[in-house]
Amino acid sequence: MAYESVHLENSITIENIISVHYFQYMSDFSFPGESHDFWELVCVDRGEIMAVAGDRQLALKKGNILFHKPNEFHNVLTNGRISPSLVVIGFDCHSPCMKAFENQLMTVQDTEKELLAKVIVEARNTFDGRLDDPYQEKLVFLEKPASFGAPQLISHYLEQLMIHLYRRYFSYPLPVRTNHLLPAKPGTGNDTYNRIVQYMEEHINEQLTIDKICKDNLVGRSQLQKLFRDAQGCGVIEFFSTMKIDTAKQMIRDQQLNFTQISDKLGYTSIHYFSRQFKKLTAMTPSEYATSIRLLSEKP
């Protein structure tokens, strides 16, 4: 038999990635706005914003996604009441079908949320530094990607996202082309510090105090605080609180316990106190986190 190959044409090609951000604005965040020569998508994972797009103002709520075309002036306006969480991705794409995304306000479904989360995960595996800095102007590659093929998957997942949205909003087929927590600081090597961290992991379901930690680990109060200030840049109780909420987030991702059971299992005095602590450290309530893009991006 004489086999013949066929060429698979790309309907959408992401040529370059300029920015990948997931960050939480303060409720009173102010930004002067900007325009640039690449596409930028904004997706609201929590809360709500007013988005300026050229001469228009659009209200975006959780699940809304908006594409700013190249050279369009745009801005984000918070309402002073709700602290929103946003996914923002800048990219180069010259595929003809991108014309359809201009001036469109859409809503992401579960599959599209998962694709956005995968873009964030692979960006963490590809780039150095934080993804929650809205002022970062240049992505810096890790010396070696944390996972094989991570840079390629960023563009592939983003292309899949665009295809899913196009099919749902503009019908299929596509036009034919004629011609893309603060990370933990490295371990200090201090045996006392490592032993205390392990102790807190073993007592994650308790309400620890500085005095109890000192007594059970035979360490002085000032030494204890210095250990964690040097290693983590925060106090020991603040670190323990963050550890408890990180554990709660894992339990929510596991979907085995409800919020009341998680609260009880981690030793909180009430579900209301647990919810307040969770929101204080994540800027989301437990229920908001449970349905967020952020949860999907933090899954192993």
Image: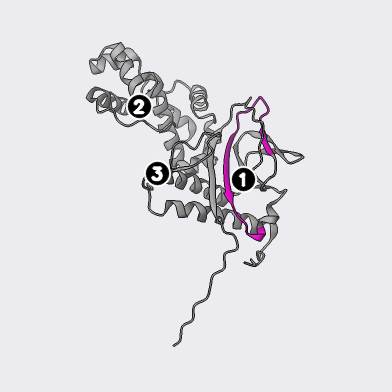
Crowd class of label 2 (few under 14; some 14 to 19; many from 20; radius 10 Å): some
Does residue 255 appear in the picture of this structure? no
Q: At label 3, which amino acid type do we have?
A: Leu
Crowd class of label 3 (few under 14; some 14 to 19; many from 20; radius 10 Å): few
Q: Which disc number belongs to residue 227?
A: none
Judged from the image, the secondary structure of the residue bearing numbered disc 3 is loop
* Residue found 41% across the figure and 54% down from its top: 149
> Image quarter for residue 89?
top right
Q: What residue did someone put label 2 on? A: 204
Where residue 226 appears, as percent x and y from the top left, is: 32, 16
Q: Is residue 210 above or below residue 203?
A: above
Q: Which disc number belongs to residue 142?
A: 3
Q: At label 1, which amino acid type do we have?
A: Glu
Judged from the image, the secondary structure of the residue bearing numbered disc 1 is strand
> Image quarter for residue 222?
top left
Pick whichever of labels 3 and 1 is earlier in the sequence: 1
Q: Which disc number belongs to residue 40?
A: 1
Where residue 51 appears, as percent x and y from the top left, is: 69, 37
* Residue found 60% across the figure and 49% down from its top: 109
Q: Is residue 96 magenta?
A: yes
Instruction: Tell me if label 2 and label 3 are in contact, CB under 8 Å.
Output: no
Does residue 16 appear in the picture of this structure? yes
